[in-house]
Image: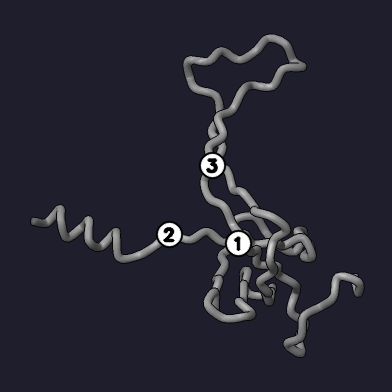
Amino acid sequence: MEANKEMDKRQDYEEEFVYLDLDDCLYSDIPPNAPFVLSGLDTLTPTLQIGDHLKLIGEYQETVGTCYIFSESGPSLNEKCPTDQNHAPSKEVKPLASLQKILKFKVCTEDGSKANAADD
């Protein structure tokens, strides 16, 4: 009975992946392992707050074709490291999701508007 309730809970929601495009942002402004809050995914302009000082405003854009997301795993423990330095160890790649839209972010200026990449 308890197992059926857990199955029902898992079937009540659909997993969805979002590709966050931060190409217009300066990565030097984002410290490693910085806390972030992503809000408003169901709005036209979601917000990404990174740390205390960096606020980004997003906008959904259609992809040209389909965007595929993959997960990557390293070589297995049974696989020996190659002795040839020109040969990289093999990795296993598995398809994770496909997307039709991306969420492109731009830095939000102090007055609340988006900064243009041309201004950089």
Amino acid type, callout 1: Ala
Q: Residues within 10 Å of mark 1 (few under 14, many from 20)?
A: few
- Across and down, in percent, residue 55 comes to 68, 76
Q: Position of residue 72 (x, y in %)?
A: 56, 37
User: Which residue is at a point 68% across and 66% down the rendered structure image?
Assistant: 62
Foreground residue among 89 and 70: 70
Mark 3–mark 2 CB contact (< 8 Å):
no
Quadrant (top left/top right/bottom left/bottom right) for the N terminus: bottom left
Q: Earlier in the sequence, mark 1 or mark 2?
A: 2
Query: Residue 56, relative to residue 109: is it above or below?
Result: above
Q: Hey, which residue is sitting farthest front in the picture?
A: 65
Q: Secondary structure at mark 2?
A: loop
Q: Is residue 20 left or right of residue 110?
A: left
User: According to the image, label 2 marks what residue?
Assistant: 15
Disc marking residue 34: 1
Nearer-N-terminus badge (3/2): 2
Query: What amino acid is found at the position of numbered circle 3 in the picture?
Result: Pro
Q: Nearer the viewer, mark 1 or mark 2?
A: 2
User: In 3D space, how far apart are the residues under numbered discs 3 and 1 (Cα atoms)?
Assistant: 28 Å
Is 78 on the left-hand or right-hand side of 107? left
The residue indicated by pointer 3 is: 95
